Amino acid sequence: MKIVVASHNPVKIRAAEQAFALQFPGLPHDVMPASVASGVSDQPRSDDETRNGARNRALNACESMPGADYWVGLEGGIDSIDGDLMAFAWMAVLGPDGRIGEARTVTLPLPRAVKRLVDQGMELGDANDRVFATVNSKHQGGAFGLLTNGLYTREGVYTEALVVALVPFVSDLY
């Protein structure tokens, strides 16, 4: 099975590898990264914009690399809710028949120090690195790992959401 992931981020690639292995056990799969546009801002700032970014990435990956079995778009986003900054991500999986499976991760409340930097125009990953004195955290555990002492990680949360996004492709009910 050929799977195109619309990212070169190793966290996103590993999440896709794990989700497909869980949903299609015993089926060999080859995961290939692709650089494609999301069609949204670099730091999506709403649920809708983030979901659209994931969908656009999956669709653009299909255009960029046709001939695969599945195309995966993952988009991290933020939104302000009652004055608090929340982080989450949307997953979109485009199947060979044109159907799209989607799921959203859990929502993570972010510290005020991160919110201040994001409000000044900094991307979430860079803000996290500054506040937590880390380097390139978005290619590691991300804000989830930093704030939960590794109990949750970006990769784990993305894997769980991708498993759910794949449900329409493994259940006869869809």
Image (tube, rainbow, N blue to C red):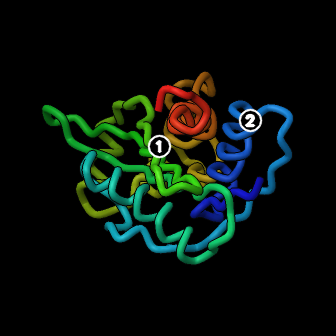
Please tell me whether residue 132 is drawn above or below residue 138 in the rendered image. Answer: above
User: Which residue is drawn at the image coordinates 40% and 40% (left, top)?
Assistant: 88
Label annotation for residue 101: 1
Q: Are marks 1 and 2 in contact (CB under 8 Å)?
A: no
* Depth order, front residue of 77/19: 19
Please tell me whether residue 61 is drawn above or below residue 119 in the rendered image. Answer: below
User: Which residue is drawn at the image coordinates 68% and 32% (left, top)?
Assistant: 23
Residue 41: horizontal and vertical position, in percent? 32, 67
* Image side of residue 74 versus residue 79, left or right: right
Mark 1 belongs to which amino acid? Gly
User: Which residue is drawn at the image coordinates 57% and 28% (left, top)?
Assistant: 171
Q: Earlier in the sequence, mark 1 or mark 2?
A: 2
* Depth order, front residue of 22/135: 22
Label annotation for residue 24: 2
Secondary structure beneath label 2: loop
Residue 59: horizontal and vertical position, in percent? 47, 65
Label annotation for residue 78: none
User: Which residue is drawn at the image coordinates 46% and 50% (left, top)?
Assistant: 99
Q: Residue furthest left?
A: 82
Mark 2 belongs to which amino acid? Phe
Distance, label 1 to label 2, CA atoms, is: 15 Å
Residue 97: horizontal and vertical position, in percent? 54, 55
- Among the 4 quarters of the image, the one containing residue 33: bottom right
- Among the 4 quarters of the image, the one containing residue 156: top right
